[in-house]
């Protein structure tokens, strides 16, 4: 009985003028309509319409890119929530962090979720690159996507690092003091780079604000851009490549 | 695989559902429960638990500080405390038009709003538009020693001044 009402409701929604103005194709019951689901959706059209069944097997890619991607989504969601309570100023930043930990409902949960997802994203990206390397998936035609992936790893590490300062506790302060002193040692550009990065000569309120803008606006925007290219290139390069197939013709590589 | 399902379907008596239909419902149901739970915890998270706003109740001197004809403007609390003919009363300084902060006029007795030119007399009645309502009076209490406490969260009717 309930399935009958559910299916009539579904049919009613699908036939409504509003639904049909948004989604123009029919139910995904034919090959053509299944393709249209992907083609006509902004978010899905970067994916291939069809994938080989074997590429979906866990051991083919160990789902490492996907795991990293899910961690990224979690980071966006929880990060936006944390921004509702955070002021990037001294000493309010530390107080806000304490408020999230001890006062706000579920504050500890979302803060820790952001932290653990960040660790997962770094770990996932590294393991994903190892997997790609050992499966020789960086080779033509995928050499450009490997470079995009390297940029994505750099952005991931920069996001981790800029987020490190935001709680404005001792760990954050000295972590960024040490890190920016390392940057200072770069030849020629080192000193001006540190000055620009911190907005001054010491880790101060300017540095907190700069790291905040980098962490919450600049780097996430660049990350989304490069992720879009990365995913789209997977389709353009013929789907994900798993373990290289054994070809008796060209056996031994030096 | 597909044929097998079709066979199973044909064997189902009406009202029964296949394993696939059941699992689809189970999966969608689990997603719905998770989504609902996430929405509720987010809503809970977004409600501030501590407010960093001035307290609505504050001390405002003693009865002796407000002889007849005194008008004191407390800028932080946005409140006038007035020593009127009938006694002491407190009045909101927030204009009833669009919420700007009014202030006492310099030349003549009265209160004016700098945003749109509303004017009020010293009892809060509108003497010039566009303000639609008089300034609300707020609760004032005095203890035995004559110390006054104003509570901006409690609105009292006009005319109920604190008898000195």
Image (cartoon, rainbow, N blue to C red):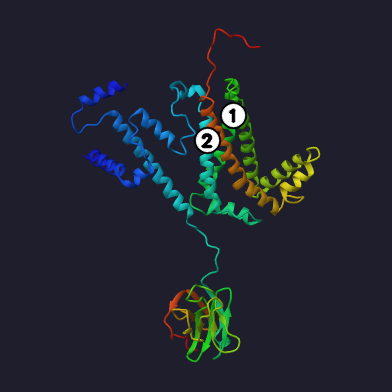
Q: Which mark is residue A145?
A: 1
- Horizontally, residue B90 falls left or right of residue A190, namely left
Residue A61 visible to an observer of this rendering: yes
Q: Few, some or many C-alpha atoms within 10 Å of disc 1 (few <14, some 14-19, many ≥20)?
A: many
- Horizontally, residue A87 falls left or right of residue A74, namely right
- A177 or A170: nearer the eye? A177
SS class of the residue under badge 2?
helix
List x then y, in percent, for residue A222.
60, 41
Indicate whether A222 appears above or below A33. Answer: below
Residue at x-position 42% and y-position 49%: B40
List x then y, in percent, for residue A153.
62, 34
Screen quadrant of the N terminus of chain B = top left
Residue at x-position 72% and y-position 46%: A197
- B121 or A139: nearer the eye? A139
Chain hosting mark 1: A
Q: Quadrant of residue B132?
A: bottom left
Q: Which mark is residue A99?
A: none
**What's the CA distance linking mark 1 and mark 2?**
16 Å
List x then y, in percent, for residue A31.
36, 28
Badge 1 or badge 2: first in the primary sequence:
2
Indicate whether A153 appears above or below A245. Answer: below
- B109 or A251: nearer the eye? A251
List x then y, in percent, for residue A40.
42, 37
Q: Residue furthest top?
A: A249
Q: Which residue is mark 2?
A: A69
Q: Quadrant of residue B70?
A: bottom right
SS class of the residue under badge 1?
helix
Residue at x-position 55% and y-position 69%: B54
């Amino acid at each position: 009985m309930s399935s009958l009402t559910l299916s009539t409701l579904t049919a009613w929604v699908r036939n409504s003028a509003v639904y049909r103005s948004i989604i123009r194709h029919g139910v995904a019951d034919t090959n053509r309509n299944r393709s249209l689901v992907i083609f006509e959706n902004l978010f899905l059209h970067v994916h291939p319409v069809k994938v080989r069944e074997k590429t979906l097997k866990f051991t083919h890619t160990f789902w490492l890119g996907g795991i990293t991607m899910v961690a990224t989504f979690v980071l966006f969601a929880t990060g936006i929530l944390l921004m509702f309570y955070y002021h990037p100023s001294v000493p309010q930043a530390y107080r806000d962090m304490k408020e999230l930990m001890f006062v706000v409902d579920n504050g500890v949960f979302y803060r820790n979720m952001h932290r653990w997802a960040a660790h997962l994203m770094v770990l996932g990206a590294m393991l994903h690159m190892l997997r790609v390397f050992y499966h020789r998936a960086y080779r033509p035609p995928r050499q450009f996507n490997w470079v995009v992936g390297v940029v994505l790893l750099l952005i991931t590490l920069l996001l981790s690092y800029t987020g490190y300062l935001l709680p404005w506790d001792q760990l954050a302060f000295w972590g960024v003091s040490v890190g920016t002193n390392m940057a200072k040692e770069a030849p020629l550009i080192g000193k001006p780079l540190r000055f620009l990065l911190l907005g001054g000569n010491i880790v101060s309120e300017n540095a907190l604000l700069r790291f905040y803008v980098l962490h919450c606006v600049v780097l996430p925007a660049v990350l989304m851009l490069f992720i879009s290219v990365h995913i789209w290139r997977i389709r353009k390069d013929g789907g994900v490549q798993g373990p290289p197939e054994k070809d008796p013709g060209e056996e031994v590589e030096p | 695989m597909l044929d097998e399902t079709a066979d199973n379907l044909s064997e189902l008596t009406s009202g029964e559902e296949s394993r696939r239909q059941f699992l689809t419902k189970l999966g969608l149901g689990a997603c719905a429960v998770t989504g609902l739970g996430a929405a509720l915890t987010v809503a809970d998270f977004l409600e501030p638990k501590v407010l960093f706003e001035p307290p609505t109740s504050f001390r405002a001197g003693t009865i002796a500080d407000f002889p007849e004809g005194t008008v004191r403007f407390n800028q932080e609390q946005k409140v006038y405390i007035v020593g009127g003919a009938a006694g002491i009363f407190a009045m909101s300084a927030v204009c009833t038009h669009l919420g700007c902060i009014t202030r006492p006029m310099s030349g003549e007795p009265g209160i004016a709003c700098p945003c749109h030119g509303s004017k009020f007399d010293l009892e809060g009645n509108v003497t010039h538009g566009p303000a639609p309502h008089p300034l609300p009076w707020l609760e004032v209490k005095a203890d035995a020693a004559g110390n006054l406490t104003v509570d901006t969260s409690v609105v009292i009717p006009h005319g109920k001044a604190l008898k000195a």
